[in-house]
Image (tube, grey):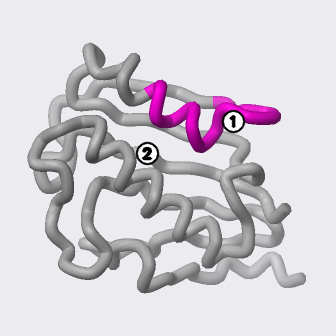
């Protein structure tokens, strides 16, 4: 397996809105760009401002990218959760646990930010290994 970085792309997750890839694979490590609650088909935000609906879509998008890269949530070793409002932490965390709560949960940072792209309330990125 080559350690040359290669782009990961899937139609099952939103296309990048800038000069970056959905993920980059380097050897057996996958670096996933942050996902927000964009519908992959329309490119429109999902959830109408509901942080729980956004979180579900974010995690669907992230799982699609992981699958395209040849891994799954079980291969995720590190995430960063960006929240517009840290008061949403418990609600986002409960949904996050549905995906990452079994087995060895990833190491994680969670930070409140001043703004996210497209008016999102939550964004999650990840680093994974091939499983």
Label 2 SS: strand
Q: Mark 2 — residue?
A: 124
Depth order, front residue of 38/56: 56
Q: Nearer the viewer, residue 88 or 1?
A: 88
Q: Position of residue 114 (x, y in %)?
A: 17, 30
Task: Name the side, left or right, on which 41 lies relative to 119.
Answer: right
Q: From the viewer's perspective, is residue 93 above or below residue 122? A: above
Which contiguous range is marked in magenta?
93-107
> Are the two marked residues, 1 and 2, in contact with CB atoms closer than 8 angstroms?
no
Q: Please say whether residue 23 is one of the residues in the magenta stretch.
A: no
Residue at x 41% of width, y 73% of height? 13
Left or right, residue 67 beside residue 58:
right
Q: Position of residue 127 (x, y in %)?
A: 64, 51
Residue drawn 35% across the image and 43% down it: 55
Relative horizontal placement of residue 78, taking residue 74 as reference (left or right): left
Q: Quadrant of residue 8?
A: bottom right
Q: Secondary structure at mark 1?
A: loop
The N terminus lies in which quarter of the figure? bottom right
Residue appearing at x 38%, y 56% in the figure: 35
Name which of mark 1 and mark 2 comes first in the sequence.
1
Q: Is residue 97 magenta?
A: yes
* Spot occupied by residue 16 in the image (x, y as percentages of width and height): 33, 74
Question: In which quadrant is the C terminus drawn?
Answer: bottom right
User: Local crowd at mark 1 within 10 Å, few (<14), some, or many (≥20)?
Assistant: some
Q: Residues within 10 Å of mark 2 (few under 14, many from 20)?
A: many
The residue wearing badge 1 is 106
Q: Residue at x 27, y 45 (%)?
A: 53
Tell me: residue 99, above or below residue 22: above
């Amino acid at each position: 397996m080559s350690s040359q970085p290669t782009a990961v792309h899937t139609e099952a997750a939103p296309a990048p809105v800038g000069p970056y890839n959905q993920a980059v694979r380097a050897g057996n490590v996958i670096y996933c760009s942050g996902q927000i609650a964009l519908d992959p088909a329309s490119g429109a935000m999902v959830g109408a401002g509901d942080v729980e609906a956004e979180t579900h879509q974010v995690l669907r998008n992230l799982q699609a990218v992981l699958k395209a890269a040849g891994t799954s949530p079980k291969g995720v070793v590190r995430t960063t959760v960006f929240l517009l409002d840290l008061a949403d932490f418990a609600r986002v965390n409960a949904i996050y646990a549905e995906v990452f709560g079994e087995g060895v949960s990833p190491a994680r940072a969670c930070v409140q930010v001043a703004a996210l792209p497209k008016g999102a309330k939550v964004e999650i990125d990840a680093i994974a290994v091939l499983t």
